[in-house]
Image (cartoon, rainbow, N blue to C red):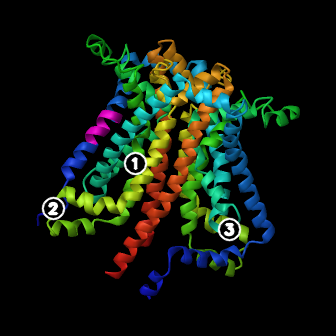
Amino acid sequence: MTQIKPKRVLPGFRLTLGFALTYLTVMILIPLLGLFAKTFTMGWHAFYLTATSARVLASLRLSFGTAVIAAAVNAAFGVLIAWVLVRYKFPGKRIIDALVDIPFALPTAVAGIALTQMYAPHGWIGKWLAPLGIKVAFTPLGIIIALVFTGLPFVVRTVQPVLASVDPELEEAAATLGSNRWRTFWRILVPEILPALLTGFALAFARGAGEYGSVVFISGNLPFRTEIAPLLIITKLDQYDYTGATALAVIMLAISFSILLFINFYQHGRAAAFRHAGS
Amino acid sequence: MSQVLFAETPTKLLTQEFGRVVHRDPLWARILLIGTASLFVVLLVLVPVAFVFVEALSKGFSVFWQAINHPDAVAAFKLTALTSTIAVALNLLFGLAAAWAITKFSFRGKSFLVTLIDLPFSVSPVISGLVFVLLFGAQGWFGVWLQQHDIKIIFAWPSILLATIFVTFPFIARELMPVMEALGHEEEEAAVTLGASGWQIFWRVTLPNIRWALFYAVILCSARAIGEFGAVSVVSGHIRGETNTAPLHVELLYNEYATAAAFSIAAILALFALASLVLKAMAERWITTDLYSDFIFRSKT
């Protein structure tokens, strides 16, 4: 029997898909392909030399290292904030909820100069930390604080709806079976919110590794010490080292894409297992 | 049974469910958790935002007023307004087209297309600028041709526009898709059987249903477009009064140690961000109302 193709009832399929694909190709795909094509023109040897130069490695380690730490801080506090917002009622709750979105809406350069000025040795917060011997501005710690700021909404906003949809009966059932609150949290709630938490973590991490505006002011920008990878790309561009900038960009993209791909596969796998269990 | 359930408002259902949970955690635990979370958010987010306004007015209102009325600052605001308006308008067209194609039809490679739309999210802003330098810069693929025809893209406003579009590309499509998915396509199909044309369906059926989601998406996209820094920084050339956008002007003033002036421009940008959040919160409530009335409508038919 030949399969009958379902007839499309609604109009506009060719027009909308055609426009969407054209716009996507012109604005995103061609520019990105141009980037990869550029690395092919430089040859493997030159690419390898750029990729393994000490300064490039140091900047990649700094960018991805601080991004992992910041995303981990965001994961812990993100779950806490989501929990408090979903489960409790308290005065000022709506304000806290609204504040979570600010890092998303505030221009990164504005956040960057504010954090730098605050954490500088004579700033609002820096002057309290300086006597304790804690230096924040112009150190990796400053980069981490800036990245915690920019990454805050990701974990909260991915975990919040999932936490809200967890059936309270699950927890009640666990409680009637004698499980204490802490155990219920780890055994019932954590598995439920883990996929969302992982997504939020990955988004915050990918965003943090590539972040520029909020970090560049507070980082100090010393080569080998506090120079983030996006800044090194700009430095290379300013020196007309187009191939070097491109090589570093391709390495960063490769790392970010593979992390997001891994997360996608993980969730796809989980969804498939869920369907299987349900059937 | 179902009629009884649907008569309840969704918020009532939520409080009923969570009413049981709320009472289970001891008071000290609740206070500790709420306190820690609130302190974290206030210190991390509220203090820096307040700090921007304090610094902007630290040298008095007249310094603030002069800083934002300086010809270079005005030019920067105008450039930001121009490029972000065009970028949001084009991304809006794309978002509507993509969401229509993806949510109203099934076709091969749909999930791959959604992945491609998400791509710019994982690209560093600096790289989003770099790709256009590689295409249109003096040493780029089209560099020689552009020079021969005397067309300037890099270090001029067209590249600022392109970089802004790239960075804010997924926002509107990603916001519209789940809402249009949830609304389904029965209403549109009913309109087809009644003889409506494609445009009529869009203007009379789809648009009224998604208006608040659309508004929300435009707000979100505008906030990001206005504030874009890294991508624009790579392609702009930083020419004062010409190719400097408002966020770039903040950087320029800050690096010149004109701190109060830098924070004055920053305060205006922060005001826009706060306004966008207020509008967004309003839109969010209306979206829930729209989806909920659709839910009621369906449960009764």
Q: Is B276 colored magenta in this rendering?
A: no
Q: Viewer-nearest of labels 2 and 1? A: 1
Left or right: where B298 falls relative to A125: left
Give me the disc on residue A88: 3
Q: Quadrant of residue A235?
A: top right
Chain of the residue where label 2 is placed in the rendered structure = A
In three-dimensional space, the C-alpha distance between marks 3 and 1, rounded to whole angstroms, equals: 32 Å
The amino acid on which the numbered mark 3 sits, given as a three-letter code, is: Tyr
Q: Nearer the viewer, mark 2 or mark 3?
A: 3
Q: Residue furthest bottom?
A: B1
The answer to if A26 sits in the magenta stretch is yes
Mark 2–mark 1 CB contact (< 8 Å): no
Q: Is residue B279 above or below residue A39?
A: below
Q: Element under label 3?
A: loop
Query: Disc 1 marks which residue?
Result: B172
**Of pointers 2 and 3, the one earlier in the residue sequence:** 2
Q: State the residue in front, A59 or B261.
A: B261
Residue at 70%, 68% in the rendered image: A183
Quadrant assignment for the C terminus of chain A: bottom left
Viewer-nearest residue: B166 or A190: B166
Please determine whether, in this image, residue B140 is positioned above or below residue A199: above
Residue type of the residue flagged with mark 2 = Lys
In this picture, which residue range is highlighted in magenta? A21-28
- Subunit of mark 3? A
**Could you tell whether B26 is left or right of A50 in the image?**
right
- The residue beneath circle 2 is A5
Q: Position of residue A13 (x, y in %)?
A: 21, 53
Assign a secondary structure to mark 2.
loop
| Residue type at numbered disc 1 | Ile
